[in-house]
Image (cartoon, helix red, strand yellow):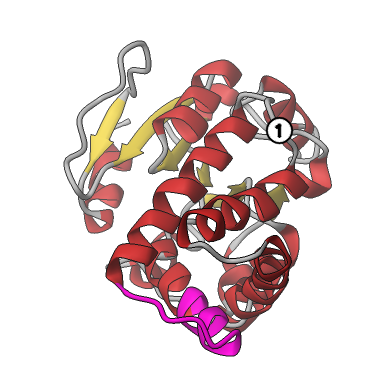
Amino acid sequence: MVKDILFDLDDTLFDFHADERVALEKTFASLNIPINDAVCERYSVLNLAQWKALERGEINRDQVKLRRFELLFDELGYRVEQAKKAASIYHKYLAEDFHYMEGAKQLLEELNGKYRLFLVSNGTLSVQEGRLKKSGIGCYFAGIFISELLGAEKPSRRFFELAFAQIPDFDVSQAVIVGDSLTSDIRGGINAGVRTIWFNPKGQPPVPGIVADYELQKLKDLPELLQKL
């Protein structure tokens, strides 16, 4: 039986890559710097690497925000000062817009009232608050837990302990976590003793040592899976 569902936000409910692309294009335009697909793809690679380093506790959040642009701008031959400007401008634009993953809004509407829904995110607080406000989906969640407020990051057990302490009558045996990241969401769920559902729409290969309880390629199939648990 499932009572509580913990949802990741980026690339689970929101299409972060689409949001990222729009914010990057606006940022580069404001700095009069040309941008193309290769630059966007390189930024995504550098950005992901910084977030993975944060998950491992190797760098802090402020370093993530700046270092990805410092590395990119260094490769492109631009000055460090421009990287700092880009980092600041980018966050403003990223908080202003959102794109849903296919079926995400419909899924929340279908699950609403049948389960208690919660959001668990490592994303930057100001960005997540801006996108949640603009999308209006905050009303579906009984609790929104963002690492910047909790003081701990997924996949640490501490993140989940702090979140669970704020949920009345929470029982890990009646909860699942749904997310796209094996290293953050799935490993986090394993650390917290929660059943895990890996949302893997692109059919990515598994990561050795991180085994999800279930795998899902389309959000629309989640309600049927939940009924079987």
Residue 12 seen in the current view: no
Whole-percent x and y of residue 22?
44, 79
Residue 38 seen in the current view: yes
| Number of other residues with Cα within 10 Å of mark 1, as a class: few under 14, some 14 to 19, many 20 or more | some
Residue at image location 49% in from the left, 74% down from the top: 24
Residue at image location 55% in from the left, 52% down from the top: 117
Given residues 36 and 122, the one toward you in this image is 36
Whole-percent x and y of residue 104?
36, 66
95 is higher (above) or lower (below) than 72: below
Whole-percent x and y of residue 126?
74, 67
Placement of the N terminus among the 4 image quadrants: top left
On the image, numbered disc 1 is attached to which residue?
59
Q: Is residue 112 left or right of residue 100?
A: right
Magenta-drawn stretch contains 30:
yes
Residue at image location 66% in from the left, 78% down from the top: 133
Q: Is residue 81 left or right of residue 190?
A: right
**Boundaries of the magenta span:** 23-36
Residue at image location 47% in from the left, 47% down from the top: 46
Magenta-drawn stretch contains 143:
no
Q: Is residue 142 left or right of residue 33?
A: right
The amino acid type, in three-letter code, at marker 1 is: Ile
Placement of the C terminus among the 4 image quadrants: top left
Whole-percent x and y of residue 145?
70, 48
Given residues 66 and 223, the one toward you in this image is 66
Q: Quadrant of residue 228?
A: top left
Q: Is residue 218 left or right of residue 180?
A: left
